[in-house]
Image (cartoon, grey):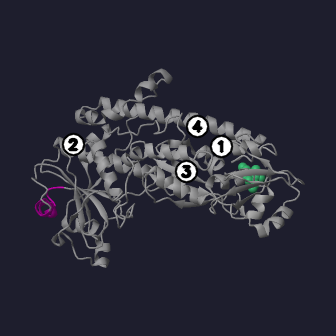
């Protein structure tokens, strides 16, 4: 009852191969992190980081990019704003380990109680610079002591053997900048904040304007006043007269062992990128050699640019065409489809309702696009809702066309369904290339856009046990038991508010 589609001839061509180039240029303030340096730069850092796990082909990632760049700028010196390109071979282990299930995934990583064992949590806030900056600032740990007139002597006494710094402020809240300064100088220069209202302390150190930063050398009560701008770099420089700040993360080449390891990693890295480059070129060539590919080539145009750079770098390796072509499962019988996707308990599915003539160009293109999109997620060990082909011979195909007003059975139709939440969403585009289809899939993943009510008549009552038994025979390479990736948010997430 379930068969893998043979239509996949065209799929071979689907070099909807990810753009190897990442979204962030070298000059970006966004720190680009790989499997090789994630541990050192992020996990072992004293700083709080936000890390975006992305794929260059993902529409929401592209939309986020400018906001993320802005966030990186305003968090400079306060927190790390990093990105991991999960399309890179080298990074797949990291993205898998971090449980990345969709793009973009944003995680906040901050130092835990044990060094090297950071606390990691998902960032689900607004995808705009302001929201990101606020949330990340909020996560910067605080080592700054709030000191009052009554407690001043005690604090001075506690730290009498070291230099110390005090920020006099009109505000009670401790800014992220000051908190980060305290992290930079942890164990070197303890930092306190005293409010303007603490008049004895204000008078003692002769403070007349706020905010004011003063430094007290060990054994001295004579304040050295900072007269620069109240920004991170200047303040760091000022406190550096006592000692250079702590490194925010371990140096790249601290020990001999590390040095060797780093070198190896670097080698591996270059080997990896070569490997993926030649892989891509072989894929592109196989696309070019296949006869049935006109439409696909066309659809792929926008992603092709990186190939140019390959020519002058490497001699392409021999073309390997033996790769297994990605396909999506096709379900031809009504009960199989109901069990997989159309019952009261079923989660999101994407159905490709095929025309009578399954070899029609639009249909093969649509299936090929879906197959290669799903393959990407599979390669990443990420889960994505099932994509299922529904041939016109499946009795439900006719009901779907009619009940959802999809149109004629001479054409292919893509529709996302969710039985549990009773919605469906049509693909309204006319082009079925990977890029168009992917952005639609992305929107579904993110819970974006308007959904329509799925008529109950299309849903089988969920007699769960029975349904389970009837499910997919084991030998079939089908993935309908996959958990849904992203729970649709109850209320729409404000997306890209600033853009
Ligand atoms: C982190 O902070 C500690 C003090 O709390 C400091 O000793 C260390 O050098 C800093 N840097 C790293 C990479 O651990």
**Quadrant (top left, top right, bottom left, bottom right) of the N terminus:** bottom left
The x, y position of residue 326, in whole percent, is 34, 47
State how far apart marks 4 and 2 are (Cα). 37 Å
> Foreground: 170 or 311?
170
Is 8 displayed left or right of 213 in the figure? left
- Of mark 2 and mark 1, the one earlier in the sequence is 1
Q: Provide the residue designation for mark 4.
A: 269
Question: For the stretch drawn in magenta, what is the main secondary structure?
Answer: helix
Is 212 displayed left or right of 80 in the figure? right
Q: Secondary structure at mark 2?
A: loop
Q: Which mark is residue 471?
A: none
Disc 3 and disc 1 in contact, CB within 8 angstroms: no
Q: Residues within 10 Å of mark 3 (few under 14, many from 20)?
A: many
- The magenta segment is 391-403
Q: Provide the residue designation for mark 2.
A: 431
Residue drawn at x 24%, y 65% is: 423
Q: Secondary structure at mark 1?
A: loop
> Foreground: 297 or 129?
129
Q: Residues within 10 Å of mark 4 (few under 14, many from 20)?
A: some
Q: Provide the residue designation for mark 3.
A: 94
State how far apart marks 4 and 3 are (Cα). 14 Å
- Of mark 4 and mark 3, the one earlier in the sequence is 3
State how far apart marks 3 and 2 are (Cα). 34 Å
Q: Is residue 326 visible?
A: no
Q: Is residue 396 magenta?
A: yes
Residue drawn at x 50%, y 50% is: 52
- Of mark 1 and mark 4, the one earlier in the sequence is 1
Disc 1 and disc 4 in contact, CB within 8 angstroms: no
Q: Secondary structure at mark 4?
A: helix
Q: Provide the residue designation for mark 1.
A: 229
């Amino acid at each position: 009852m379930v068969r893998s589609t043979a239509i996949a001839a065209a799929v071979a061509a689907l070099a909807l191969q990810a753009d190897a180039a990442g979204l962030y240029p070298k000059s970006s303030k966004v720190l680009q992190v790989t499997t090789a340096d994630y541990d050192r730069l992020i996990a072992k850092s004293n700083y709080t980081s936000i890390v975006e796990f992305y794929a260059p082909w993902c529409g929401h990632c592209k939309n986020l990019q400018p906001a993320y760049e802005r966030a990186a700028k305003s968090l400079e010196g306060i927190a790390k704003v990093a990105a991991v390109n999960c399309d890179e071979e080298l990074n797949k282990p990291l993205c898998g380990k971090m449980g990345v299930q969709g793009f973009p995934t944003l995680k906040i990583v901050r130092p835990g109680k044990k060094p090297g064992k950071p606390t990691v949590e998902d960032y689900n806030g607004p995808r705009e610079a302001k929201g990101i900056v606020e949330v990340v600032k909020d996560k910067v740990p605080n080592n700054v002591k709030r000191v009052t007139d009554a407690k001043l002597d005690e604090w001075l006494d506690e730290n009498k053997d070291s230099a110390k710094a005090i920020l006099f402020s009109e505000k009670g809240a401790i800014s992220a900048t000051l908190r980060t300064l305290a992290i930079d100088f942890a164990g070197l220069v303890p930092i306190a904040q005293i409010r303007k209202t603490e008049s004895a302390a204000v008078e003692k150190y002769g403070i007349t304007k706020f905010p004011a930063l003063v430094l007290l050398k060990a054994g001295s009560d004579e304040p050295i006043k900072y007269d620069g701008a109240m920004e991170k770099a200047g303040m760091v420089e000022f406190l550096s007269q006592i000692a250079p700040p702590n490194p925010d993360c371990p140096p790249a080449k601290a020990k001999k062992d590390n040095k060797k390891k780093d070198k190896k990693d670097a080698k591996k890295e270059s080997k990896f990128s070569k490997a993926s480059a030649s892989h891509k070129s072989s894929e592109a060539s196989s696309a070019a050699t296949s006869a049935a590919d006109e439409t696909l080539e066309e659809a792929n145009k926008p992603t092709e640019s990186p190939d140019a750079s390959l020519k002058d770098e490497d001699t392409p390796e021999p073309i390997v065409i033996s790769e297994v072509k990605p396909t999506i499962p096709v379900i031809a019988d009504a009960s199989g489809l109901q069990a997989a996707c159309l019952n009261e308990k079923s989660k999101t599915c994407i159905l490709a309702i095929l025309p009578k003539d399954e070899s029609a160009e639009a249909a093969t293109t649509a299936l090929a696009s879906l197959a290669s999109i799903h393959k990407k997620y599979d390669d990443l060990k990420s889960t994505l809702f099932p994509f299922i082909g529904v041939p016109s011979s499946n009795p439900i195909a006719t009901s779907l066309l009619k009940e959802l007003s999809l149109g004629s059975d001479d054409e292919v139709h893509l529709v996302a369904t969710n039985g549990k939440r009773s919605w469906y969403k049509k693909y309204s585009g006319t082009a079925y290339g990977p890029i168009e289809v992917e952005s639609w899939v992305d929107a579904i993943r993110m819970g974006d856009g308007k959904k329509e009510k799925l008529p109950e008549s299309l849903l089988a009552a969920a007699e769960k046990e029975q349904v389970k038994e009837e499910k997919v025979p084991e030998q079939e390479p089908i993935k309908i038991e996959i958990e849904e990736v992203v729970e649709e948010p109850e209320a729409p997430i404000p997306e890209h508010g600033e853009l």
